[in-house]
């Protein structure tokens, strides 16, 4: 493309079109996305607080859930505030450095979530397949190492991808038909090996873990035992399927199979909607979290005299 078009080496800012083709609904979209953002932040912060104040939840599973909830708050905050501002402003520009930072942070949190979900799968594998050795396998040191490795992988992968993208020459229009600075399919093809590694390596670890988990559960004789064992990993399984399902649809699909508007809708789902669903899934499907929420609510609204 750069051979056929003028190479713009003086690019200082981009224009994020966002939902500018639906200007008559901007105020409605602003209210809807603002409510989504507030609920997402409050829901995930509530999960963090409940885990912190309830000693019964000081276990590896909830240590990772606390990391995931913090991650979701950060993940959503990368895209939604700028999108909300653009919905009410005529100036939809973002600086070159601002675009680079937004892309870096988005990739950082997305990649971290990939590896954190894999760490959570390993935790569930240890709990179900090696219950007698679970506390020895998933001690505090191992949990911290797994969480730190997830964040470090996010930092390194995001740094490599963002540096690669923003050292390339930019050709043609500075207008981006999206609501945030995301790696677009033409650029993604250039880093497809790295993208495949980021998506598929944690996914394969999760897949192997769940093959072992399901195999172990099927060997349990009682139906109640099978149900209880599956209930301990069902929330994580649903969250993982939502995250990877949308990521695979978005990035591992035939070229030009969706219009730009559909692409934006899909990006909106995996970068915004799934983050509001995660605390709902964990609070509704996890008895221990529900009990902890109830006890915390009673302490707040009905304190003992």
Image (cartoon, rainbow, N blue to C red):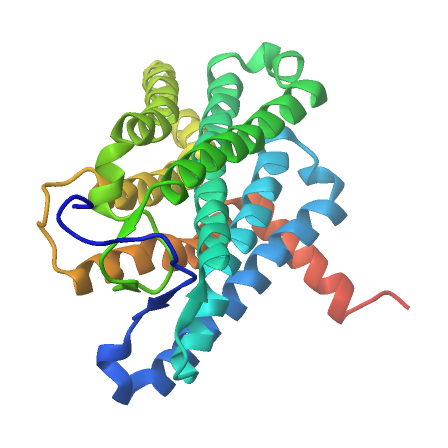
In this orientation, which residue lies closer to the viewer: 149 or 287? 149
Q: Residue furthest bottom?
A: 24
In the rendered image, residue 246, in percent from the top left (x then y), is placed at 27, 46
Query: In the shown orientation, is residue 213 left or right of residue 137?
Result: left
Query: In the shown orientation, is residue 127 left or right of residue 296?
Result: left
Q: Residue furthest right?
A: 305
> Residue drawn 14% across and 40% down?
253
> Residue drawn 41% across and 79% down?
91
> Residue drawn 39% across and 79% down?
87
In the rendered image, residue 14, in percent from the top left (x then y), is placed at 37, 64
In this orientation, which residue lies closer to the viewer: 62 or 185? 185
Give the position of the C terminus as an image quadrant: bottom right
In the rendered image, residue 63, in percent from the top left (x then y), is placed at 64, 35
On the question of residue 285 being in view, the answer is no
On the question of residue 79 being in view, the answer is yes
Res. 299 image quadrant: bottom right
Query: In the shown orientation, is residue 104 left or right of residue 137?
Result: left
In the rendered image, residue 33, in percent from the top left (x then y), is placed at 41, 73
């Amino acid at each position: 493309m750069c051979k056929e078009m003028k190479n713009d080496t003086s690019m200082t800012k981009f224009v994020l079109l966002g939902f500018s083709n639906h200007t008559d609904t901007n105020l409605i979209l602003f209210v809807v996305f603002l409510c989504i953002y507030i609920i997402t932040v409050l829901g995930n912060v509530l999960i963090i607080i409940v885990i912190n104040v309830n000693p019964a939840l000081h276990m590896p599973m909830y240590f990772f859930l606390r990391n995931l909830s913090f991650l979701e708050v950060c993940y959503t905050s990368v895209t939604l505030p700028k999108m909300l501002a653009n919905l009410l402003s005529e100036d939809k520009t973002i600086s070159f450095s601002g675009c680079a930072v937004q892309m870096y942070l988005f990739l950082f949190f997305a990649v971290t979530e990939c590896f954190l979900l894999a760490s959570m799968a390993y935790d569930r594998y240890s709990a179900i397949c090696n219950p007698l050795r679970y506390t020895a396998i998933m001690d505090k040191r191992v949990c911290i190492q797994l969480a730190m490795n997830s964040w470090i992988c996010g930092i390194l992968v995001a740094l490599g991808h963002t540096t690669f993208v923003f050292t390339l020459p930019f050709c043609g229009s500075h207008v981006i038909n999206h609501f945030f600075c995301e790696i677009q399919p033409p650029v993604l093809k250039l880093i497809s090996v790295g993208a495949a590694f980021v998506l598929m390596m944690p996914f394969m670890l999760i897949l192997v873990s769940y093959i072992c988990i399901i195999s172990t559960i099927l060997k349990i004789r009682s139906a109640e035992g099978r149900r209880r064992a599956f209930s301990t990993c069902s929330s994580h399984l649903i969250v993982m399927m939502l995250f990877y399902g949308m990521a695979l649809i978005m990035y591992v699909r035939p070229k030009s199979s969706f219009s730009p508007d559909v692409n934006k809708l899909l990006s909106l789902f995996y970068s915004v909607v799934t983050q509001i669903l995660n605390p709902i899934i964990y609070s509704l499907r996890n008895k221990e979290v529900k009990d902890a929420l109830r006890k915390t609510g009673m302490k707040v609204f009905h304190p003992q005299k």
